[in-house]
Image (spheres, rainbow, N blue to C red):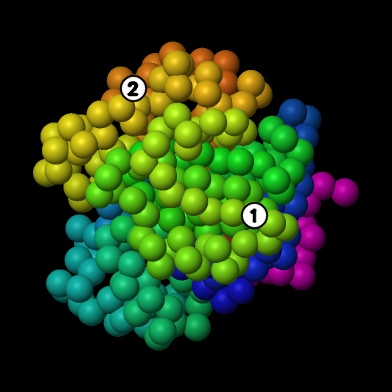
């Protein structure tokens, strides 16, 4: 795997290798911290540098990548678009060509997915998508890690994503297919996922995994092991928020709706969340919610991703 622009850049083997390593890194880190030792395993990135470019706001992505690079012995270089002005001050391809002379990987959160594609065309250094308007694959690695922690495996599990057919939905359908899960996107009319992504996910599916989209909330959620939602208006869609609130009426994840899922169902949300909008406070703050484990797993999954891209042959940081 050279770049990680999309979940579709990973093979099922990549996903398993990254998740296994993320679990091992999490266990080793927990042990080190519990024993009062440093969680840093400097040999993994061994002084290498990673640029973190943000064209949109972030809490989890910035914090987890910056801490993660530090814990692997590297140097993180966070940069905001107010200083770079992608495509305005400088062409995005030139930004990549310059940055790769300084750093060994470029992690970028951007609006236009094409910015990532153009960077990957010119840069030999790995380009990692930390959210574009089309996908959010780093999030989905953490989501899959969280599902495995809960159920022991992903294969054969059903995930119902209720809400906008957006970047998170796209990466979930692709990542779920690669991990052998049945993924259903449950969306209002006019807010479904990209049909090309659905077709690609169906092509990539392993172990009998299926992908589907429906506008029937009860049907879509029925028997699901995992119920997932995201904001109705993503970053950059703030002007559409009122219209979307009207269109998404009936698509809030409520305690009543959770009853239609499996009796052992868990609730996930990539965060940030809007209680009373896409999810009831009783659900996100209730016993089925795993949202803060999911947020924590961003750290472990991304450390494993960076190790996979930059130091695939080291086992440092893994549990014995
Ligand atoms: N889930 C997620 O990507 O959070 P941030 O936008 O805060 O990075
Ligand atoms: N779909 C949301 C995800 C935020 C992590 C957005 O793009 O704003």
Relative depth, front residue between 231 and 92? 231
Q: Position of residue 134 (x, y in %)?
A: 35, 60
Image location (x, y in percent) of residue 102: 44, 75
Q: Is residue 169 left or right of residue 301?
A: left
> Distance between the Cα atoms at labels 1 and 2?
32 Å
Mark 1 or 2: in front is 1
From the viewer's side, name the closer residue of 101 and 271.
271
Residue at left offset 41%, top offset 26%:
253
Image coordinates for residue 11, horizontal then vertical, percent:
65, 68
Q: Residue at x 43, y 64 (%)?
A: 197
Q: Nearer the viewer, residue 152 or 186?
A: 186
Q: Main secondary structure of the magenta part?
A: loop
Percent coordinates x, y for residue 41 in the rendering = 70, 52
Image quadrant where residue 282 sits: top left
Badge 2 crowding class, 10 Å Cα cut-off, few under 14, some 14 to 19, many 20 or more, is some
Could you tell me if residue 180 is visible in this image? yes
Numbered range of the magenta stretch: 310-320
**Horizontally, is 237 left or right of 185 in the view?**
left
Circle number at residue 209: 1
Residue 253 appears left or right of 289: left
Residue of label 2? 275
* Number of callouts: 2
Q: Nearer the viewer, residue 4 or 153?
A: 153
Task: Check if mark 1's residue and mark 2's residue have beta carbons within 8 Å.
Answer: no
Please, what secondary structure does the residue beneath circle 2 have?
A: loop
Classify mark 1 as within 8 Å of ligand 2 or not, answering yes or no: no
- As for residue 115 lying within the magenta part, the answer is no
Give the residue at x 53% y 62%: 201
């Amino acid at each position: 795997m050279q770049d990680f622009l999309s979940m579709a850049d990973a093979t099922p083997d990549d996903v398993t290798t990254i998740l296994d390593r993320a679990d091992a890194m999490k266990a080793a880190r927990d042990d080190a911290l519990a024993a009062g030792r440093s969680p840093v395993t400097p040999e993994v990135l061994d002084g290498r540098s990673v640029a973190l470019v943000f064209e949109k706001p972030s809490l989890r992505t910035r914090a987890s990548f910056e801490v993660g690079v530090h814990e692997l012995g590297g140097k993180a270089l966070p940069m905001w678009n107010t200083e770079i002005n992608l495509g305005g001050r400088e062409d995005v391809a030139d930004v990549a060509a310059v940055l790769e002379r300084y750093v060994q990987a470029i992690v970028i959160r951007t609006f236009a997915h094409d910015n990532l594609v153009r960077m990957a065309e010119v840069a030999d250094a790995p380009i990692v998508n930390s959210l574009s308007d089309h996908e959010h694959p780093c999030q989905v690695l953490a989501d899959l890690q969280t599902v495995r922690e809960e159920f022991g495996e992903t294969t054969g599990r059903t995930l119902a994503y209720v809400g906008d057919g957006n970047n998170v939905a796209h990466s979930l359908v692709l990542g779920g297919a690669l991990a052998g899960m049945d993924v259903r996107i449950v969306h209002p009319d006019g807010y479904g996922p990209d049909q090309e992504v659905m077709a690609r996910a169906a092509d990539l599916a392993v172990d009998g995994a299926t992908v589907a989209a429906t506008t029937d909330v009860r049907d879509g959620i029925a028997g699901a092991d995992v119920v997932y939602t995201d904001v109705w208006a993503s970053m950059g869609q703030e002007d559409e928020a009122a219209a979307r609130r009207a269109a998404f009426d009936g698509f809030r994840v409520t305690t009543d709706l959770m009853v239609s899922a499996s009796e052992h169902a868990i609730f996930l949300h990539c965060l940030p969340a809007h209680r009373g909008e896409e999810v009831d406070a009783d659900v996100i703050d209730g016993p089925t919610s795993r949202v803060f484990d999911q947020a924590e797993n961003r750290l472990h999954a991304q450390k494993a991703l960076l190790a996979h891209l930059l130091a695939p042959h080291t086992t440092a940081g893994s549990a014995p």
